Amino acid sequence: MTLNILFSAPPKLWDRYKGALHQALTECGIEAQVSPDMPAQDTDYIVYAPNPSLTDFTPFTRTKAVLSLWAGVETIVSNTTLTQPLCRMVDDGLQLGMTEWVVGHVMRHHLGMDRHIHGLRGVWDQTTPPLARDRHITILGLGMLGAAAAQALAQLGFNVTGWSRSAKTIQGITCEHGPDGLQRALATAEICVLLLPNTMATQNTLNAQTLALMPKGAVILNPGRGALIDDDALLSALDTGQIGHATLDVFRIEPLPQDHPFWHRPNVTVTPHIAAETRADTASQVIADNIKRGETGQPLRHLVDRTTGY
C-alpha cells in the first residue's frame, strides 16, 4: 500500500526536503507519495513545521500522526483541533549542531576572545583566563540538547551544573531541579546556557530576580527560546554590569527588528537563529523511522506530552 504524506511547512522548505524524504522513506522500505498539496481526507501522516496554511486539523480524520520538523512544538501543542499523536523532532544533526554552537560560544567567552578580536589596537593585554576546571557553567534545561551540551563541556574540563524542572541524573554533571535548585544553579553560573522548551512554566525563567542571583558580570547564552528571558530585565542587568555579556540566537520576534536595543549594545551579540538548524537529511531519517514504526505497530518515538508541552 502506498502511504499519503502531507508536507505542511513553509514553501521554501519543500525543495530542501522532497529529495531527502523520498530517499529516507525508500531506505526504510516505505512506499509513499509525499506532497505539499495532499487532500486532508487522503492523508496518512503530516510532516509539519509552523505555517499559516494548516491551523485546523479537524478534516484529517485518516491521519495517524503529526511529525514535527522542529524540536519546539509550542506553536501547535495547544491547538484544540489537533487530536492526532504529535511527535517532536529529535535527531543527531540537531543535537550536534547545538552542541557545537554552545561549545564554541562558551569557549569564546571563557577565553575572552572578544577582547583580543575587537579590543584596542596596540594594547598588550596579557590577562589570562582560568582553566576550564575553574570555570562554572550552568545549563538550564537537561533534555536531549541540554544534556549533550553539558556533557561536551564537562569533557573539556568545565565545572558544569545542569538544572531542569524535574530530577535528572547525568554522569559528570551536578544536576539540580525545582525552584531551590534553580537558585543554587544560578548562584555559580559564570556562563549560563538556556536550553529549556518554551512553555508557560519556563517563560521569563531569567527575570530581574533570577538575574540578580548570578555572579556579577556573568555571561548568558540563549540558543533555546526567546521567551525564556525577560528582555527588559536583561537590558537593565546589562546596563548595571550585573550581566557582562549576552549572546542571543533566539528572540520573541524574528527576524529581530532593526530598532531593537539588542542590535545596538556592545555587550550583546546577536546570531540569527542558527544555533541548531534542522538538517533535511538527518531529520528525514527520523521522520521515516517514525512512519515505519507507526505502520508496523511499534510505539512512536518522541511523542509530545500535551500536559507539559514537550
Image (cartoon, rainbow, N blue to C red):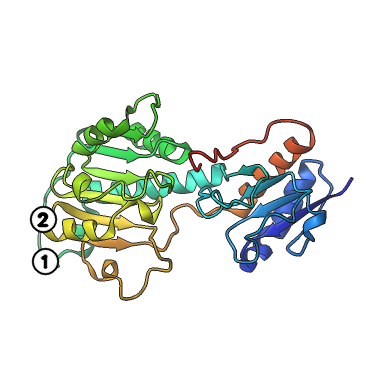
Mark sitting on residue 125: 2
Q: In this view, which residue lies farthest toward the right?
A: 1
Q: How many marks?
A: 2
Mark sitting on residue 46: none
Q: Secondary structure at mark 1?
A: loop
Q: Label 1 is placed on what type of residue?
A: Gly
Q: Secondary structure at mark 2?
A: loop
Q: How packed is label 2: few (under 14 Cα within 10 Å), some, or many (20 or more)?
A: few
| Residue 23 image offset from top left, x and y in percent | 75, 51
Q: Spatial distance from mark 2 to mark 1, Cα to Cα?
A: 9 Å
> Which is nearer the eye, 61 or 288?
61
Considering only vertical position in the picture, is 185 above or below 209? above
At horizontal 29% and vertical 61% (from top left) the residue drawn is 269
For the question of whether residue 167 can be seen, the reply is: yes
Q: Which residue is mark 1?
A: 122
For the question of whether residue 157 can be seen, the reply is: no
Left or right of 103? Residue 117 is: left
> Which is nearer the eye, 117 or 175?
175
Q: How packed is label 1: few (under 14 Cα within 10 Å), some, or many (20 or more)?
A: few
Q: Quadrant of the N terminus?
A: top right
> Which is nearer the eye, 223 or 6?
6
| Residue 192 image offset from top left, x and y in percent | 28, 44
Considering only vertical position in the picture, is 206 above or below 254? above
Considering only vertical position in the picture, is 256 above or below 221? below
| Residue 258 image offset from top left, x and y in percent | 34, 75
| Residue 227 image offset from top left, x and y in percent | 37, 54
Marks 1 and 2: in contact by CB < 8 Å?
Answer: no
At horizontal 26% and vertical 69% (from top left) the residue drawn is 261
At horizontal 79% and vertical 61% (from top left) the residue drawn is 39
Q: Label 2 is placed on what type of residue?
A: Asp
At horizontal 28% and vertical 66% (from top left) the residue drawn is 262
